[in-house]
Amino acid sequence: MSTESRVFGKRAEKHILILASGDKVRHMTVQPWMAALSVCFISVFSIGYLAATSYLVLRDDLIGGTMARQARMQHEYEDRIAALRAQVDRVTSRQLLDQQVVEDKVEKLLQQQMALSSRHGRLGSLLERAEESGIAGEAPQPIAIMPQEDGKQADASGGLRAIERLMGITGSQAEQRTALAYAPPAVTGLRETISDRADRLFSKVTLSLKNIEQEQRTRIDSLTAGADETTEAIRNILTRTGVKVENEDLVASVPASAAEAPVGGPFVEPEAAEAFDNSLVALDSALGRLEQIRSQASKLPFSNPSSASDITSHFGNRLDPFIGRLALHAGIDFRAPTGTRVVATAPGTVITAGKSGGYGNMVEIDHGNSITTRYAHLSSILVNTGDRVEKGDAVARSGSTGRSTGPHLHYEVRLNGKAVDPMRFLTAGRKLDNYIN
């Protein structure tokens, strides 16, 4: 066997451990594997001991760092939550503010609509009076002031709901907060756009209200002007006949029943009213004046006592047919065969019904306002003294009694007891037909 073989083939030497204790001596043979195992065991124990010692030394630092990290994360989370809550509160506050603004605007529009509806009712009654007076045009249209997106109109409640839907003012506060909390950032811009649309809608409604009010004002002013023009035309016609026109301003402003009732008290200036109410009052006063002067005109003798008969002799100086010299003819004569129907030319009270000198059979009627009419040379009388007659009532039949040369009707109009030309009243009556009938 070679040297090299002996070297590699040599077995590991054993170690002998000798232990002495007094007189006793012991020895142990330590195998190599036992030495290796002991070394390993001691190494593992040392490493574990060092690791445990390091953990105990560094544990507090690790725990403190972890807790600090968790605290920072918690603070950041709480700050984020607070920021989101503040954002939600701001958006909700803005929404509530928008809702309050919308409700205030809608309330104002509803008040304006109610005012217009009230005016519409008052104007309707005035238009009926104007139509009866012959100066009104077409009737007013119903009021609907809430325009929708398609250009149609709806009532105020529908407009309110449309505006609220447009502004997103629906649902409970919790639902609103939830929706706003999870809304994307574009919600703010969208709400501003919706607010702009709501403002445009309010502008349209306000403009519609103003247009309706302006149309009503224009119509009222036109009717007032028409009533005043008609009143003035009638007054001018009555004035040319010599009739004294009563103060229609006072009569028109006070109803007949109120004028007759006992009233009194100190004078106090009337309460201030809006311009529209003033225009309604002006129209009411104008219609009152027109009605009063028409009522006055209807009581005056403007009609023809024998419309089917021709006039044969006019009012004024003429040759008297009996004595052949100039004399005043105090009336006008109508060619009327005996028995022709004679009617009252205005309402009044019969103050004479019988023979009266040269008039022969005569009927005299008092029409008030110091105006009387006489119907003479009658063949028969159909009324009695004290009778109340209306315009167009038959009062007598024509004839040739008294100082007459043949059958005819002698007709007179007397103002304050003095004879005036009846043609003034007949001509005025033809002109008044355009304003009264």
Image (cartoon, rainbow, N blue to C red):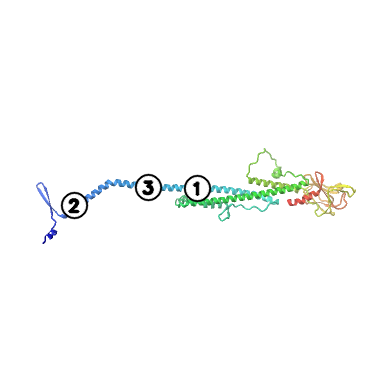
Please report whichever mark, 1 or 3, sits nearer to the chain's N-terminal start.
3
Q: Are marks 2 and 1 in contact (CB under 8 Å)?
A: no
Asked whether 376 or 248 is in front, the reply is 248
Q: Secondary structure at mark 3?
A: helix
Query: Which numbered circle lies on residue 432?
Result: none
Question: Residue 267: where, in percent of width, then height?
Answer: 67, 38
Q: CA distance from mark 1 to mark 3?
A: 32 Å
Q: Residues within 10 Å of mark 1 (few under 14, many from 20)?
A: some
The residue depicted at 69 percent of the width and 50 percent of the height is 130
Residue matched to label 3: 74
In the image, what residue type sits under mark 1?
Answer: Leu
Q: Secondary structure at mark 2?
A: helix
In the image, what residue type sits under mark 2?
Answer: Val
Q: Secondary structure at mark 1?
A: helix
Q: Residues within 10 Å of mark 3 (few under 14, many from 20)?
A: few
Question: Residue 111: where, in percent of width, then height?
Answer: 58, 47
Q: Are marks 1 and 3 in contact (CB under 8 Å)?
A: no
Residue matched to label 2: 39
Q: Quadrant of the N terminus?
A: bottom left
Residue matched to label 1: 96
Determine whether, in the image, residue 308 is placed left or right of residue 145: right
Q: Residues within 10 Å of mark 2 (few under 14, many from 20)?
A: few
Asked whether 234 or 404 is in front, the reply is 234
Q: Give the mark count.
A: 3
Asked whether 215 or 182 is in front, the reply is 215
The residue furthest right is 323
Please report whichever mark, 2 or 3, sits nearer to the chain's N-terminal start.
2
Determine whether, in the image, residue 237 is placed left or right of residue 13: right
- Based on the displayed image, in which of its 4 quarters is residue 251 positioned? top right
Please report whichever mark, 2 or 1, sits nearer to the chain's N-terminal start.
2
Question: Residue 328: where, in percent of width, then height?
Answer: 86, 47
